[in-house]
Image (cartoon, grey):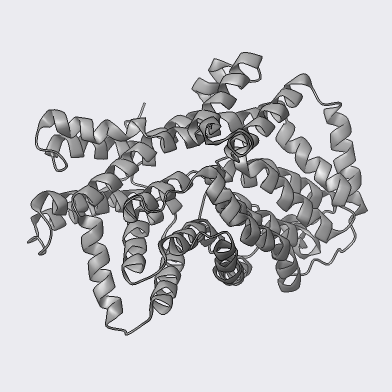
Amino acid sequence: MTFKLGFKPIPTCIALVVVLGLWLMPMPSGLTANAWHLLAIFIGMIIAIIGNAMPIGAVSIVVIALVALLGVSAPTPSAAINEALGQFANPLIWLIGVSIMIARGLLKTGLGARIGYLFIAMWGRKTLGVSYALAFSELLLAPVMPSNTARGGGVIHPIMKSIAKSYNSGPENNNSGLIARYLALTNYHANPITSAMFITATSPNPLVVDLIAKATNSQVSLTWGTWALAMFLPGMLCMFLMPLVIYILYPPEIKQTPNAVTFAKEKLAELGAMKIEEWLMLCIFSLMLLLWAGVPAAIFGKEYAINATTTAFIGLSLLLITGVLTWQDIVAEKAAWDTIIWFAALIMMATALNKLGVIAWASEHMEAGIMHLGLSWVGASILLLLAYLYAHYAFASTTAHISAMLGAFLAAGIALGAPPMLFSLLMAGASSLMMSLTHYATGTSPVIFSSGYVTLKQWWTAGFVMSVINLLIFVFVGGLWWKVLGYW
């Protein structure tokens, strides 16, 4: 057997050179030696993630070892390892990890696919209706399916491909414009919108919550219910307009789709009546939504409030007790355990950078640079928001992008006068909406792009147009909605 290294040499060497170069450079004024050295490790980590030097979980293990060994965040070896491992007890990390485990139930029982077929059977007589059926199927799955790749690429995309195939539309026939291109684009562009609507709709969202809390000194602490209510109106408007906008950009040649309804009904017939496992999954899914939405507290009082992570554990416990999921299913859910490890490392780094004053230092320099432009807080906030969102052209990982930029950009905007809650929600929304831009923006994009229905130019054009429309909706409709809610 040929020996194979566990890392890619070129991106690994680039990351190491950057770390060593920064480590040996003279420290900038305003930072301690430990702060500067930790920043060097952090930048090296981001470069390694972007360059895919190793899987993100493996990079995280190496970073934990380095932080503990070099003692950059604590004075003693024991304190350093405690600091490095401290975030494994963070409830936000377990919220997303357990939610990924719960999502396995949607796939195992077939409930996720059934929901998609039901929507198409109801609305699928026209191409536009099929698009809305796919989009709102994804929306229904989003609260308990934190892997946006599994949701958009694993559940919805196979359904979309089957419908396109029923019309013989695809690259193999050189006729993707019949229906496949339009459905593929709407299949994809529902994904960033649904990801923005719930904390549990995509893996990096809890990281966003944590970075917002740190950047605002816990002045802004987003709960599951607060996030969902804030994103509801702008998110729903984006979901309604998205299929129409893409219909105008790339109109399908086939407008009527009776085959889609027939196809969906045939698939439902194959699935048969709902099995007991599906009913149990549906009931537990509904219970979790009620608890996440804070219904018990609203009815009986605040003493009956249940933490979002506790709710996730309740849901997983019920799925195990009822046998919908087995312990082997949980052990085999590699994505969940992987997420728990790399999230813990990223939040550990974010916490240490904030504690050592690096975030404050970076935001102060950014603030000083923007102040020279003479902008009001509105202009400064828009500039920061646009720079943050469109910087995603340079990132193939939303996690790396958020880790590298969100904390400092948010702190700078608030320091320049932006209302903390308003700017926090805008940055939170942008952290998912930026996924619309490219064919490498998030895990879902290469899955759908590789099907060959959309050219690179068409993908990037649709991505830019949708990014502008989504952002305008979040800024104006979202801003007004949050004002009505009394959030700012």
Q: Residue at x 66, y 30 (%)?
A: 287
The answer, for residue 5, to whether it is visible in the render is no
Image location of residue 471, percent across then percent down: 55, 68
Q: Quadrant of residue 469?
A: bottom right
Q: Quadrant of residue 254?
A: bottom right
The answer, for residue 62, to whether it is visible in the render is yes
Furthest toward the bottom, the residue is 374
Q: Is 110 or 356 nearer to us in this picture?
A: 356
Q: Is 14 or 34 nearer to us in this picture?
A: 34
Q: Residue at x 56, y 24 (%)?
A: 314
250 lies above or below 236: below
Image location of residue 463, percent across then percent down: 59, 66
In the rendered structure, the answer to whether residue 373 lies left or right of residue 429 reads: left
- How many marks the image carries: the answer is 0
Q: Residue at x 75, y 73 (%)?
A: 248
Q: Is 336 or 254 nearer to us in this picture?
A: 336
Q: Quadrant of the N terminus?
A: top left
In the rendered structure, the answer to whether residue 251 lies left or right of residue 189 reads: right
Image location of residue 170, percent across then percent down: 75, 56
Image location of residue 259, percent across then percent down: 90, 50
